[in-house]
Image: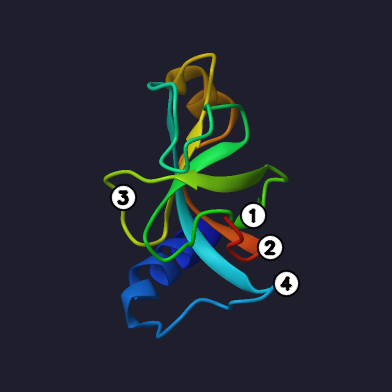
Amino acid sequence: MTQRLMLCALLALPALRALPAQAGGEIVVFRTFYDQGTTTASGSPVFEGEAGCGSAFPLGTVLDLDDGQEVVCLDRGLLSSYGVDVYCNHGRAACSRENPSGPMGASVVAWGGR
């Protein structure tokens, strides 16, 4: 039931006018994983906890995902506006087994900043 509600919330995202642009705002994102590349769109090297984020998130935004993972948006990619593609240095298949991909809630810890 929870997954169905999250999917419905994710599908409703295009109807949202704007994300909460302050710390503490709650949103729904679609998490995936990647393991390629050496440098992010912000110019920093890739590292665990760094993410490529959709256009709805300014570079430097910090998100606390509902499963406890905290990520910082320092990269871009071919993502939906609310996509969060987390870098995983031990292979995206391994990360997907440890932390399932898909829709999940997130809190905005810091908005933009880079």
| Marks 3 & 2, CB-CB < 8 Å contact | no
- Quick one: label 4 or label 3, which is nearer the N terminus? 4
At label 4, the amino acid type is Gly
Q: Secondary structure at mark 2?
A: strand
Vertical order, 28 against 83 (above or below): below
Label 1: how many Cα within 10 Å (few below 14, some 14–19, many 20+)? many
Depth check, mark 3 against mark 2: the one in front is 2
- Location of mark 1 (residue): 62
At label 1, the amino acid type is Val
- Location of mark 2 (residue): 110
Q: CA distance from mark 1 to mark 2?
A: 5 Å
User: What x and y, as percent, mark residue 34?
Assistant: 41, 29
At x 61%, y 28%, the residue is 48
Vertical order, 24 against 102 (above or below): below
- Quick one: label 4 or label 1, which is nearer the N terminus? 4
Q: Quadrant of the C terminus?
A: bottom right
- Quick one: label 3 or label 2, which is nearer the N terminus? 3
- Quick one: label 1 or label 3, which is nearer the N terminus? 1
- Location of mark 3 (residue): 79
Q: Is residue 29 left or right of residue 14?
A: right
- Location of mark 4 (residue): 24
Q: Nearer the viewer, residue 103 or 63?
A: 63
| Marks 4 & 1, CB-CB < 8 Å contact | no
Q: Secondary structure at mark 1?
A: strand
